[in-house]
Image (tube, grey):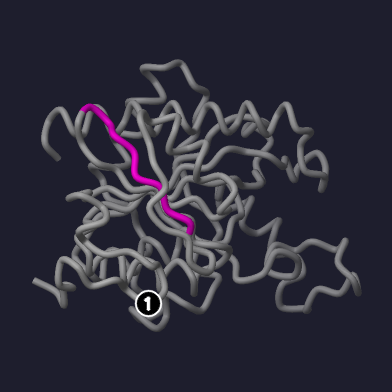
């Protein structure tokens, strides 16, 4: 048993208490606060429960079970802070739900990527485990996402993400203010492609390591809104909407299946 909060204790960063989340043990973690309401409402009856800093929270009902949807903002540090406090109020299962850029030709715009592991190209996770400790997802949660996608006919890919602390140099993008990428990172995109990594994003490695260090479960599913093998441009709004609809439906189905079997 970890350092749990008292039922009515409102934690500093997330602005939530255990009483406020009504026994929820699952939390969906989008990065963007603006995505929380739509994601919560896609799950079922939903209501706002908190908004503090980057942590906007809604509580949804999935087949009679409370599920928290809480944004984390961008990057590993805010993910870890949120998870620390969410764990203290009773969350045991964390599912990142976000967007991503694919780096393999087979991964198309609008597809979903389910990450089973992540390259730790960031610093947050190193405060929880040494760098040679693997960042891996929960088998049970990942399998539930895969089975849900297959059941719904949603095109999905399971593989390894590259989690970077930066959007430009860490992901070898040259359309930044200076256009400069450090020599140690030049050619890194090609290397990750050769090793079979599927996508770049900024949160999954920290998510997996923090959950593992807590003895809790984590998974990650992202909709593809940029295809780096074709262009550096983000997809048009209709593709973004398709990706969002797909990851929402997959997560809802996975939660229903997990709740049904009591996992």
Mark 1 highlights which residue? 12
Q: Quadrant of the C terminus?
A: top left
Residue 185 image position (x, y, % from top left): 71, 72
Q: Is residue 101 left or right of residue 141?
A: right
Q: Secondary structure at mark 1?
A: loop
Front one among 185 and 166: 166
Residue 40 image position (x, y, % from top left): 43, 38
Residue at 20% in and 58% down: 19
Is 45 drawn above or below residue 128 in the view shown? above
Q: Determine crowd level at label 1: few under 14, some 14-19, many 20+ residues with C-alpha closer than 10 A.
A: few
Q: Quadrant of residue 151?
A: top left
What's the magenta bit mostly, secondary-structure-wise? Answer: strand
Residue 64 in sight in this render: yes
Is 94 drawn above or below residue 243 in the view shown? below
- The residue furthest left is 1
Front one among 77 and 173: 77
Residue 219 in sight in this render: no
Whether the magenta-drawn stretch holds residue 180 is answered as: no
Give the residues drawn in magenta, as a range: 56-63
């Amino acid at each position: 048993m970890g350092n749990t909060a008292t039922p009515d204790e409102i934690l500093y960063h997330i602005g939530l208490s255990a009483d406020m989340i009504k026994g929820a043990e699952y939390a969906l973690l989008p990065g963007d606060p603006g995505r929380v309401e739509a994601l919560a409402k896609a799950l079922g009856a939903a209501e706002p429960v908190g908004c503090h800093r980057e942590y906007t929270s809604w509580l949804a009902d999935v087949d009679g079970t409370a599920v928290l949807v809480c944004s984390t903002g961008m990057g590993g540090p805010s993910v870890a802070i949120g998870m620390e406090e969410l764990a203290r109020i009773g969350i045991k299962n964390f599912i990142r739900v976000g967007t991503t850029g694919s780096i393999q030709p087979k991964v198309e715009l609008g597809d979903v990527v389910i990450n089973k592991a992540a390259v730790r190209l960031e610093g947050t996770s190193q405060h929880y485990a040494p760098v040679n400790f693997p960042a891996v997802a929960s088998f049970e949660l990942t399998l539930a996402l895969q089975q849900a996608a297959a059941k719904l006919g949603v095109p999905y890919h399971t593989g390894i993400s590259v989690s970077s602390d930066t959007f430009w140099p860490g992901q070898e993008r040259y359309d930044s203010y200076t256009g400069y990428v450090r020599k140690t990172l030049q050619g890194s995109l090609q290397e990750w492609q050769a090793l079979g990594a599927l996508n770049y994003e900024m949160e999954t490695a920290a998510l997996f390591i923090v959950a593992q260090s807590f003895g809790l479960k984590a998974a990650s599913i992202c909709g593809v809104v940029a295809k780096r093998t074709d262009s550096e441009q983000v997809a048009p709004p209709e593709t973004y909407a398709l990706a969002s609809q797909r990851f929402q439906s997959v997560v809802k189905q996975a939660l229903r299946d997990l709740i049904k079997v009591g996992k």
